[in-house]
Amino acid sequence: MKTKRKKLIAWFDERIPLRDLVEFMGKKYVPVHRGSVWYYFGGVSLFLFIIQVVTGILLLLYYKGSEQLAWESIQFIMSKVQFGWLIRSVHSWAANLFILSVFIHMFSVFFERSYRKPREITWLTGMLMLFLAMGFGFSGYLLPWNELAFFATKVGTDIAGVLPVIGKPVMIFLRGGEDVTGATLSRFFGFHVAVFPGLFTVLLGIHLFLVQRQGMSEPLGGENSSDRGVMPFFPNFMLRDLLLWLIVLNVLAILAVFFPWELGRKADAFASAPAGIRPEWYFLFMFQTLKFFPPQVLVVDGEVLGILLFGLAGLLWMFVPFWDRKSSRGESNRTVIYVGIFVVIYIIVFTILGWVL
Amino acid sequence: MRNFRVIRTVALLASSACMCITVAMAGDQCLVCHEALGGKVPSLYKNDVHRQKGITCAGCHGGDATSDDMDKAMDKKGGFAGVPKGDAISQACARCHSDAERMKAFGSSLPLRQWENLQASVHGNLSGVGAEHTVQCITCHDAHGIVRVSNPSSPVYPLNVVRKCTGCHANAGFMRTYNPSLAVDQLEKYRTSVHGMRNAGGDPKVAECASCHGSHSILRPGDVKSRVYPENIPATCAGCHGNVAYMAEYKIPTDQFDKYAKSVHGVALLQKHDAGAPACNSCHGNHGAAPPGVESISNVCGTCHALNAELFAGSPHKKAFAEQKLPACETCHGNHEISPASKDLLGVSPDAVCARCHALDKNEKGYALAQVMRRMVDSLETMEAESKGLVDEAEQKGMEIGEAKFKLRDVRQARLETRTIVHSFDESKFRPVVGKGLTIAVSVSDEARGVIHEFFFRRLGLGVSTLIITTVGICLLVIIRRIDRKQKKNAET
């Protein structure tokens, strides 16, 4: 048996030099410490992205991105296409888990301050991918062309429209006109299946290349450092990753079977807005904040101020490797930790408030 | 010539003496002089209800009615207004009729604010020049010689009001100015109605224009506050027809409103506010209101239920009903208390209407047909209920079943169609409709069963895949442990 396996490996190795790759991966080591578990969320995010790509391609075989046919085509997928219900539900659930996983990955990197020199570009590409993932979510939400998505997109694009100077043109660009119509659906479909995946693939390539090139970051200071040694990336870390992927796959299957993603009622531009319009959960903390903002703050419109503050906060967060100089020097920086804790608590509290209120 | 002057002087002196005597007696110098001058007005005013209440000409025209000096009596500085024009006419009336204190002083129990109500009514339109209202108080009540409405000589007395209203409303030329689309044949129709005939015969109790439309507050029929707005018509008619004491002498039932309110038509109009549902006038007519005759009932109902009427006209029942002088629709459905159509009307059970004429030993052909038709309707209803139950079950399980649910409407539609086609009383026409419904119901049930099966298949599939994933996971775990142990051992050696 062993001889046969060796012969098979040798057959492949003769044609494709696999041993070199295995040797390369075998030389890669993953630090083992108290926070090692967070390393897996990068892999889980990658796995969920792959699922999104595969299920997305399968959905594309039947989905029709037009105002008249979008809802009907999803209904067809859900009821007539073999395993269509599974593919669509997995796509929708995986999208949400992907964003959750990306958020966890981002915060783990932040709290470990793994963004510090020399990994600034890895952090930047990661942040850009996070924004793109939210863009994927926002554009994909409209594609079934159901009532909730229609009105939520209307509200979402309205928010973009309140920005001074660029707001209106941005809103018209997003909607393909003054209102959310079939034109909006067409361009959201285009963003979702062509523009965003293209950009994401480039950024993911750079991100993975840098991770491979620079290796895993080790924690700051002595207390968390690799006192328990290192673990070979291949096969130890990779097999563990694989095990986690299998668990995630099973969770997805359970969610798809027990909680199939609802289609809702077809959007009707002339119908009154249904109760309970709210964006996807990952936008909820921003949405809720804007609702709490007073209509006027001094001379500035409350909503405009809120959006500008979120924009500013996002930029500060994105460029943390450049202003957190202490971490780059290998020193502890409590301010950054406190800011991070505040942001996590803020997001959780406002997301809950968004659901409850 | 001289003689004539003498005669004239004597005559004037004599008339002045008479006037003085009259003024002294009546206290209204206007009437004294104007009576002497001739014309209809003074004699009309003598019988006017206002004069009886002590109101002099000055009450409307202003001036000093107690002075026998014409210059003083008709002095504009003294408030003399002359003959009022336009809105000033009605304003003169409203000075008392809209003033509760004044009306109380006259011991009047008349409603107040008629002028204001008139302005808010359909007659409150401005005239062509736009400076005044088209209709003033005197348009209907006349100016001098106004008497109580209950006085037969009043132009708005029930027997006269029709003539008063149609003075304008039957005048096509006049009506064109204000409402060209409004019919002008109301009087002609009214005269053919039971109300109109009795009114012409001198019965002041029957309905005339104001009985239904109101008097001062007449609104367009499309106005929800109008007494003749579809939803208000039954109550308007019942104002008289539901009044037992009022209707006693006519010896006709007074329970029509109560019956109608419970009927399918009454529920639709009065409870569901469906303005398209028939009110009293839809069947009886409005201006030409009369009970439909035996011959005309199917035509009346057929105005809305056109297909039913057409099918009935081609059915064997048409001839049979005509021979027995039975009204077409009413025989089975009743008149005012028409209950919603249901399968219970059909068949040979004691409650079914067919059983009233058909029995095993009487008109047995119809008996057999009624039995067959009822069975078919029952089976369609059972199949519909079953398919709906399956669709509901699939939906409750969270499955996508929108298409089957949509098709379920066609089953219901077929069931409703049976209610129409039944009026043909022809099995060859009835069976295909039931068959269509049954075919769709079977396909919906099959689809729903398939979806429910799929629901359980998904759970089974999940169980199997979870088992496979778990096995692979355990194997991976074993491999990881083995590798870890091997590497540890190598490191130790």
Image (tube, helix red, strand yellow):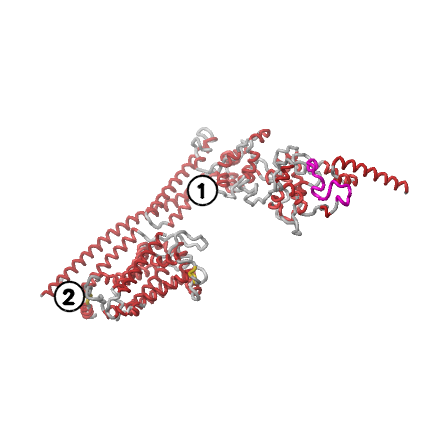
Q: In this rendering, does residue A256 appear at all?
A: yes
For disc 2, the marked residue is: A6
- Circle 1: element type: helix
Q: Nearer the viewer, residue B443 or A215?
A: A215
The image position of residue B222, as x and y in percent, is: 56, 45
Specify the subunit that label 1 lies on: B
Q: CA distance from mark 2 to mark 1?
A: 75 Å
Q: Which residue sits furthest left?
A: B493
Please tell me if label 2 and label 1 are on a single chain: no
Neighbor class of circle 2 (other Cα within 10 Å; few <14, some 14-19, many 20+) is few
Q: Which residues are magenta?
A: B49-73
Specify the subunit that label 2 lies on: A
Q: Is residue B71 left or right of residue A353?
A: right
The image position of residue B8, as x and y in percent, is: 86, 40
Q: Which disc is residue A168 wearing? A: none
Q: In this rendering, does residue A206 appear at all?
A: no
Q: Is residue B229 above or below residue A6?
A: above
Q: Residue at x 69, y 35 (%)?
A: B52
For disc 1, the marked residue is: B416
Q: Is residue A113 above or below residue B378?
A: below
The amino acid pointed to by label 2 is Lys
The image position of residue B42, as x and y in percent, is: 75, 39
